Image (cartoon, helix red, strand yellow):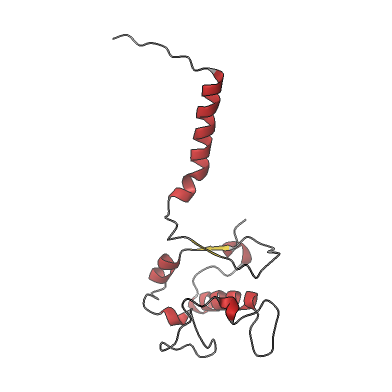
Amino acid sequence: MQFTKVRLRKPMWLALTAAALVLVALAPGLVHSQADIQVLSNPAFENDQRPPAVFNHDEHNAVAELEDQCWYCHHMDGANPSPDEDSIGIPCADCHSVEAMEDMTPLMMAYHKQCKECHMKEKAGPITCGECHVR
């Protein structure tokens, strides 16, 4: 059996190298489907100081044993969450404004309070800025 040596011309070599680099760069994003990954960002925040938090909703709920308890996070009354009421489909910014208002938690604090207080209570999950907002 005889092998023939194939010489790639420079443009072909560059194209193949570029394609390989793009594939390597995209590989981490190919591990999960888009339905699994959610970016917790809100257009109400105009000048984000950190990147949005990446959050796998279904995986989180499975690990936290919160399946079928949507009201726990998607509350109508934050002080008294109830299984009879939830805010699914209602953007947080519909109730929480970016700026502080009387008797209402500001939007950024609402996000942080919702996640961090639960993580601290359960002694599980990220609680520092960089653990959720990975640069």
Measured as percent of width and height from the top left, residue 50 is found at: 66, 62
Looking at the rendered structure, the number of numbered marks drawn on it comes to 0
Work out whether 13 lies above or below 131. above
Residue at the top extreme of this rendering: 2
* Figure quadrant of the N terminus: top left
Residue 5 pos. (x, y %): 42, 12
| Most distant residue in the left direction | 1
Q: Is residue 32 left or right of residue 131?
A: left
User: Dividing the picture into quarters, in which one does residue 11 lie?
Assistant: top right
Q: Who is closer to the viewer here, 126 or 25? A: 25
Q: Can you give x and y, in whole percent of width and height, for residue 69 in the image? A: 40, 80
Q: Quadrant of residue 104?
A: bottom right
Which of the two residues, 11 or 54, is positioned nearer the viewer here? Answer: 11
Q: Nearer the viewer, residue 3 or 101?
A: 101
Report whether 65 appears left or right of 49.
left
Quick one: quadrant of the C terminus? bottom right
The residue under the point 43% across, 50% down is: 31
Q: Is residue 16 above or below residue 30?
A: above
- The correct choice, above or below, for 27 with respect to 87 in the image is above
- Name the image quarter holding residue 46: bottom right
Which residue is located at x 44 percent, y 89 percent? 82
Determine the residue positioned at 67% across, 76% down.
98
**Which residue is rendered at x = 43% and y = 54% of the image?**
32
Residue 2: percent from left, percent from top: 32, 8
